Amino acid sequence: MSADYTVQGSVAVVTLNNPPVNGLGLATRSAAVDAIRRAESDDAVKAIVLTGAGKAFSGGADIREFNSPKALTEPTLHTLIRVVEDCSKPVVAAIHTVCMGGGLELALGCNYRVALPGAQIALPEVKLGLLPGAGGTQRLPRVLGLEMALNMVVTGTPVLSEKLAGTALFDEVFPPGTDLVAAAVAFAGRVADVRPLPRVRDRQVGYPNPEGFLQASREQVKAMAGPFPAPLACVETVAASCTMPFEDGLKFERERFLHLMQTPESKALRHAFMAERAASKVPDVPSDTPTRSIASAAVVGAGTMGGGIAMNFANAGIPVTILETTQEALDKGMATIRKNYENTVKKGKLAPEKAEQRIGLVTGTLSYQDIARADIVVEAVFEDLQVKESVFRQLDAVMKPGAILASNTSTLDLNRIAAFTGRPHDVIGLHFFSPANVMKLLEIVRGGETGKDVLATALALAKKIRKTGVVSGVCDGFIGNRMLEQYLRQAYFLLDEGALPQQVDAAIERFGFAMGPFRMSDLAGNDVGWYIRKRRAVESPHIAYSKTADLLCEQGRFGQKTGAGWYDYRAGERKAHPSQLVNDMIVQHSKDIGVERRAIADVEIVERLVFALVNEGAKILEEGIALRASDIDMVYLTGYGFPLHRGGPMFYADTVGLPKVLEAIRSYARGRHGEAWTPAPLLERLAAEGKGFNG
Ligand code: NAI
């Protein structure tokens, strides 16, 4: 049963029951329709209370039905709401905890709504590139007024029920601690005989001359919507609640909803939403795998990454000790942590006492003995295997049995690091991204011997510290940086062939990347890649890459931190100014290597950068380094600034069509440095089969 039916006196109580949040999937809708009809035909029943079991009134559509024909199978949500709204007996929605999306639309179809305080009320469809498609845009303004309803529909932000007390959305918001169902049944008893039945659809929005307000809203929303069409469509549909009769408005809403469903932007957002949920699942590590308790943590190294990693633990209330080699390095790291918290307080994003509480959870030490009892230790020392070896040997010697030993390495072989210890099953990669206290992505690197309970603990920890955890196998660069390597190689080749940094950056930023490769490198530090290239030149001398980036580093142009990189930076500023010196150097380098520079179209720049990611992503997928294409998309969306409206590189390739992607790759394979373009066998196979990476 996904809706329970009981009768209390003359009131029927229909309880949606579809854990975890009473999603309105087909079975639940059918059961709810049956229950309402049963109550209607029972002469002993005078009124109906509609509520939700467990943790929600209803969280709305059942995400398990996303992209499935079930969502459109009768009874649809529309039909359910009609059945409720046309019922000849009063229906009272009894709302608690969560009332969102379709759940709120269902409540709006009821004759009365009562609620407990603290319930989250929202129409969040816009966050999936959609609009509320079951009457929400027409009914909400009729109870909240145009302005408040428009704001909720356009932003999707939840509002607490007590903040909406006194509006026509709620007939009563009970005091905290009230027995909701008992109070709702009593309320239903009081209104059982009231006729005519109040219906939201019969109300008027009553906003005289809304055009001025609507026009201002359109302009404001357009400015903040970026590439997404949904927010503006939300304005237009909510506007229809003022300008059209109810039934016409409903039809208009339906048309706009169906249109948005088909837009690539909404498909991308829905993909990202599902991808995030999928990423936490590992086929051979079931959700009931036992996890280890993480009540204390340690970090080795208080540099760029170590400090930010420690903040993640402190933010989650986990005490953390940072180990350094010198008091000076430790003091510097601790001071940076304090400054970061102070800046957050200054921005008004954190209460000063909370910041102090968190700072209080971070302690520093120079002694391994002081971290020996930690449940987890994350190593973030220099990216040098010998340094890592000495650290892991010491960790192995001092850490208590059962402690998790994690490395934040970006590119080194985790299996070799694990082999420095006598407990490789306790070793895992936790690859944070800079700034580690801000970036959402956490690549969880599963070594050959990493224990399943260690992996399950890391996945749970990712959730606890509010990161998107994505599991990667072991390879040079893991998922993200291994792909980035190919992307950057192309960016540098483009410079040799005729482009300049500002053109490359502008083209890819127009595609939607938060930052082009050259601005990004200047931010991260050009020396980081330089060291990695030097190592690779020894390990894999056959791989060709442009020398331009090395020439830049040889001049000490490491990026923003040295005031000069691919661009020039004025003291204290982050704005990138094209550099004549660098541009001359690039042109000269083309001459030196005998390449005649040509005009390169932006389309070529975007294709070469993005398809380089896709081709390497396909190899990573085929090798099993990534578990699924959507995991690769998550890595790029949450760690590398890939445009959200394009859904990640693999999803974008599916949108373009794999045969087209393959054709472009083959054409680049015929050009200069064609060896960088060997098509991934998986890409060739899927293209031939007419399939996509995501099915
Ligand atoms: P960093 O140079 O800023 O900091 C390293 C810190 O480790 C220094 O404070 C140093 O004093 C300390 N240290 C060195 N040897 C030590 C030892 N034996 N015991 C204790 N402390 C020691 O380096 P960064 O950038 O924080 O990188 C650390 C690790 O994180 C590297 O493995 C790097 O690949 C990885 N990483 C770096 C990212 C970045 O953007 N900087 C991003 C993701 C990972």
Image (cartoon, rainbow, N blue to C red):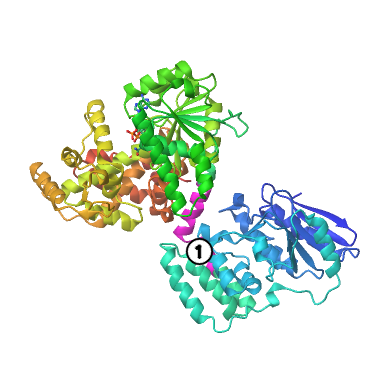
Vertical position of residue 398 compared to residue 188: above or below? above
Q: Is residue 260 magenta?
A: yes
Vertical position of residue 609 compared to residue 149: above or below? above
Vertical position of residue 280 compared to residue 389: above or below? below
Q: Is residue 689 visible?
A: no
Q: Is residue 533 magenta?
A: no
The part of the chain drawn in magenta is 256-275
73 or 208: nearer the viewer: 208
Residue displayed at 28% across by 56% down: 507
Pinpoint residue 74: horizontal percent, then vertical percent: 68, 60
Q: Which residue is mark 1?
A: 260
Q: Quadrant of ligand 1?
A: top left
Place residue 179 in its image quadrant.
Answer: bottom right
Amino acid type, callout 1: Leu
202 or 172: nearer the viewer: 172
Place residue 553 in its image quadrant.
Answer: top left
**In terms of secondary structure, where does tag 1 sit?**
helix
Q: Is residue 341 visible?
A: yes
